[in-house]
Image (cartoon, rainbow, N blue to C red):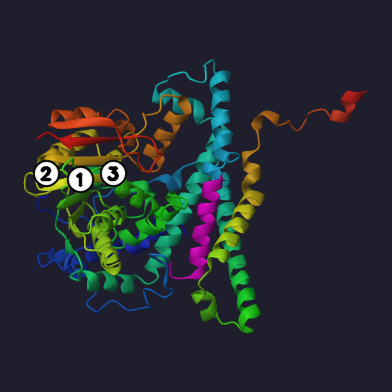
């Protein structure tokens, strides 16, 4: 049974089992895995830029001027949070929704053109 | 920069700061103390530059905050949406089973399930999308807090002896092997980075997908915890308290009770105490193993745990249940909320695949064996009366197990 007995303190670099998920390959080649991560990271970066622009526009409309400090300190209203939440959801769906398409309807590249079936 | 690189950059100071200067341990080993910079930590910037939303201190910059919110959105789409990638993966899992001659409800051993699923691109894409959000979340919050590491360490140190509530750290405590890993692939885990509490708190905002910023799940657990029949509640314990959200909610529900909370992670209880103190809520936090707490026999009227049992090997859980029974007074209640306290372990292939995935790649080493853990049996064997139709938990809204110590 483990106890609260005193021993050498645990350090981050000693006697510690680090995660190994950085090395995980799921999509056939490490580059493909990296691409998926890059695409999701890029989406987050783009959203962050858009969010800054939204706040900037709002501050300009209400104060006629804007500073970095004003942007950082802007406290969203409940209406902001609701609107931004919907816009964020819509963007995520626009960009990543395609990932969930149904495999069952997938057609191979060499498949026959459907119009030819009408002859 | 990937998660491991970030960890390596900050790890050198972590071992030292976890001990002497940060936590005030007089007896820290000389080697660790020698590694500590002699100069006071640089106060790079305010640790609260952007105020709060509700009770959540905002992340230190708009870009980090927006980035995290978007990652949570992607995770929610992938994982929860009816037309998301997990739904597609679940559908595909049925097809994979049929293609290999199995019925969708076939009960297969874990290695066979993994062998079938790991060949399918849709299932692997769902896993990769999830993993990407997890890794990006951790690296984002860690980078944000490390950027002002000195400031946050100083904030922790300043709060250490502040009330309300109290903090007991054991910087030289032996951390058992079962807790020495990067749980949930959090860089540094709960015990290897002095800023683990910050990283965990903001990282789990992503995990809980909209139910964590105002402690929504934890408040629900605290609200549901059943009282003893005589309704006398003088002392309450939460074990495996992480950053203290449930303990704070318990104190708010029972303002006249003495609330204690323990966790193996010193950085976790350190952050938990600071946060509770900031919120003006008097909780007593102690770094301790749940299976060896040192509290007197019959000390508590209520004990609560929230999603900790699956993080512990079954053998240690048995020891913890023995300790729970020892600490409860006759008629006292234990309310555990975990994976299988309201539902049963998965039996179908896709569910088993997920449990295996979580165990292996989300670094939850004990989650797989937890599927076989006989919680009710252990509680009964230690003198507890167990019922499965207790108040619904926060996870799923179904009746939840709870136990009462025999008089």
Q: Position of residue B404 (x, y in %)?
A: 18, 36
Q: Quadrant of the C terminus of chain B?
A: top left
Region in magenta: B58-77
Question: Does B5 sit left or right of B372 as displayed?
Answer: right
Image disc number at residue B327: 2
Specify whether residue B63 is painted magenta: yes
Compared with B306, B5 (above or below) is below
Residue B303 is tagged as 1
Residue that numbered label 3 is attached to: B308
- Ranked by sequence position, the earlier of labels 1 and 3 is 1
Compare residues B98 and A26 and report the one nearer the observer.
Answer: B98
Parent chain of label 2:
B
Q: CA distance from mark 2 to mark 3?
A: 18 Å
Q: Residue furthest front?
A: B230
Label 1 and label 2: CA atoms lie apart by 9 Å
Give the residue drawn at x 24%, y 50%. Answer: A15
Picture coordinates of residue A94 (x, y %)? 66, 50
Task: Please report contact status of discs 1 and 2: CB closer than 8 Å, yes or no.
Answer: yes
């Amino acid at each position: 049974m483990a106890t609260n007995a005193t021993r050498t303190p645990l350090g981050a670099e000693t006697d510690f089992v680090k995660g190994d998920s950085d090395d995980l390959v799921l999509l056939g080649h490490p580059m493909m895995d990296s691409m998926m991560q890059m695409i999701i990271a890029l989406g987050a970066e783009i959203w962050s830029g858009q969010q800054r622009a939204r706040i900037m526009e709002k501050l300009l409309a209400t104060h006629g001027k804007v500073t970095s400090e004003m942007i950082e300190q802007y406290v969203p209203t409940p209406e902001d949070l609701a609107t931004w939440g919907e816009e964020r959801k819509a963007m995520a769906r626009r960009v990543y929704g395609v990932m969930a398409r149904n495999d069952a309807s997938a057609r191979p590249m060499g498949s026959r053109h459907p119009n030819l079936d009408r002859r | 920069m990937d998660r491991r690189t970030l960890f390596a950059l900050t790890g050198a100071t972590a071992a030292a700061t976890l001990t002497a200067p940060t936590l005030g341990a007089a007896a820290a080993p000389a080697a660790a103390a020698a590694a500590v910079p002699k100069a006071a930590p640089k106060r790079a910037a305010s640790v609260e530059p952007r105020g709060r939303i509700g009770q959540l201190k905002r992340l230190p910059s708009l870009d980090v905050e927006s980035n995290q919110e978007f990652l949570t959105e992607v995770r929610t789409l992938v994982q929860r949406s009816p037309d998301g990638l997990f739904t597609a993966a679940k559908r595909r899992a049925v097809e994979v089973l049929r293609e290999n001659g199995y019925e969708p409800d076939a009960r297969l051993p874990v290695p066979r399930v993994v062998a079938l699923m790991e060949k399918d691109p849709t299932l692997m894409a769902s896993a990769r999308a999830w993993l990407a959000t997890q890794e990006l979340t951790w690296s984002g919050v860690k980078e944000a807090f490390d950027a002002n590491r000195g400031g946050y360490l100083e904030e922790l140190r300043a709060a250490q002896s502040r009330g309300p509530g109290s903090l007991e750290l054991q910087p030289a405590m032996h951390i058992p092997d079962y807790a020495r890993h990067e749980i949930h692939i959090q860089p540094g885990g709960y015990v290897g980075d002095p800023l683990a509490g910050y990283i965990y708190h903001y990282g789990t905002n992503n995990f809980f997908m909209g139910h964590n910023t105002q402690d929504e799940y934890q408040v629900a657990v605290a609200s549901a915890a059943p009282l003893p029949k005589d309704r006398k509640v003088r002392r309450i314990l939460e074990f495996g308290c992480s950053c203290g959200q449930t303990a704070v909610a318990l104190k708010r529900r029972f303002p006249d009770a003495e609330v204690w909370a323990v966790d193996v992670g010193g950085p976790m209880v350190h952050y938990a105490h600071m946060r509770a103190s900031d919120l003006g809520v008097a909780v007593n936090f102690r770094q301790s193993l749940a299976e060896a707490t040192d509290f007197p026999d019959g000390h508590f009227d209520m004990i609560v745990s929230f999603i900790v049992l699956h993080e512990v090997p079954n053998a240690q859980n048995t020891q913890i249940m023995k300790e729970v029974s020892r600490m409860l007074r006759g008629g006292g209640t234990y309310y555990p909320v975990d994976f299988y306290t309201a539902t049963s372990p998965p039996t179908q292939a896709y569910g088993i695949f997920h449990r295996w995935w979580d165990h292996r790649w989300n670094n939850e080493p004990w989650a797989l064996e937890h599927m076989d853990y006989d919680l009710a049996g252990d509680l009964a064997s230690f003198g507890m009366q167990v019922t499965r139709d207790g108040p619904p938990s926060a996870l799923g809204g179904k009746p939840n197990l709870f136990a009462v110590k025999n008089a």
